[in-house]
Image: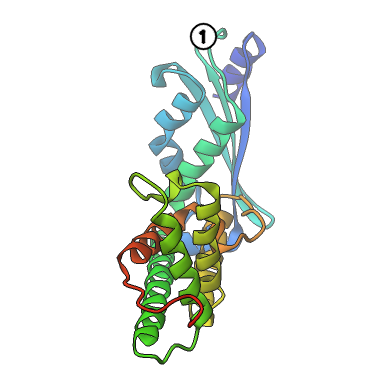
Amino acid sequence: DLSRVMDELDHYTGNVWTHIISLHREDAERLGNDHADTWRTLLRTHRNDIAAEMKLQPEDLRWYDAFQDVGDHHHVHMMAWSDDPKVGLLTQKGVASIRSKMTNEIFRDEMTELYIRKDAAYKESIQTAKALLLERIRALETGAADDPGLVKELQELSQALAQVGGKHVYSYLPKSVKAQVDAIVERLAQLPEVAACYDQWWQLKDEIAGYYGRNTPPRQPLTQRKEFRSLKNWIIREAENTSFSMSADSV
């Protein structure tokens, strides 16, 4: 009853939020979100989420939507307000949260696959870097080292750690020792095998961000990403546990 709703809003003294929620036509058709019933189900499913982000109790949320199938986008226009005109607050963070929840619902299957691939690329990056460092340590022990600079840096890190008391965790090391760890990680990251894995991880990270309408920051070196902190702590343990029988000069 549009006339009744219009009359209600004409006399409403609080805030009314108007949202447009849309999908590219090709995405909507591919995912089955190309008719009003699907959108109605989606919004009813997330009714409580919308209320929560508007700082409302679900029973206080009033809302209406109109589905439109025009142009390059399938979309709905949503009007939402509170039963109590003095209650309700929606921030940019709240808008982002609503969008994120709906994105997860609509693209659930595709994003699950992306997250699986991203996790696999992350693990492969770590495992490849570890394997290559161990390979070079073993080669040094047999006198067949082909990357002596990397092993020398690990040996120097081992000597530096011996001068640091307490438990050796990257977060608690002096800046100078952290810099040594970072240098080893950076050298590993430049190896073609590791670089290829990291490239794939970053591309998938960027693709996932695109689903949420966010842009990833400019590409950062592997050593600056907190996700790879475990590799730094592993290198610290290797530096502590590896027996260097050769001197730095001989390397």
Q: Which residue is at the front of the view, 60 or 124?
A: 124
Residue 108: x and y in percent read 40, 55
Q: Which amino acid type corresponds to the residue marked 1 in the rendered image?
A: Asp
Tell me: residue 121, above or below residue 68. Answer: below
Count residues near mark 1 (Cα–Cα under 10 Å), then give few for <14, some for 14-19, many for 20+: some
Q: Which residue is mark 1?
A: 84
Residue 12: x and y in percent read 62, 10
Can the viewer see residue 152 in this picture?
yes
Q: Which residue is at the front of the view, 18 or 147?
A: 147
Q: In the figure, residue 242 lies in which quadrant?
A: bottom left
Q: Is residue 226 shown left or right of residue 206?
A: left
Name the residue: 38% across, 49% down: 169
Label 1: which secondary element:
loop
Where is the N terminus found, in terms of image quarters? top right
Q: Is residue 188 shown left or right of residue 70?
A: left
Can the viewer see residue 37 in this picture?
no
Tell me: residue 33, above or below residue 4. Answer: below
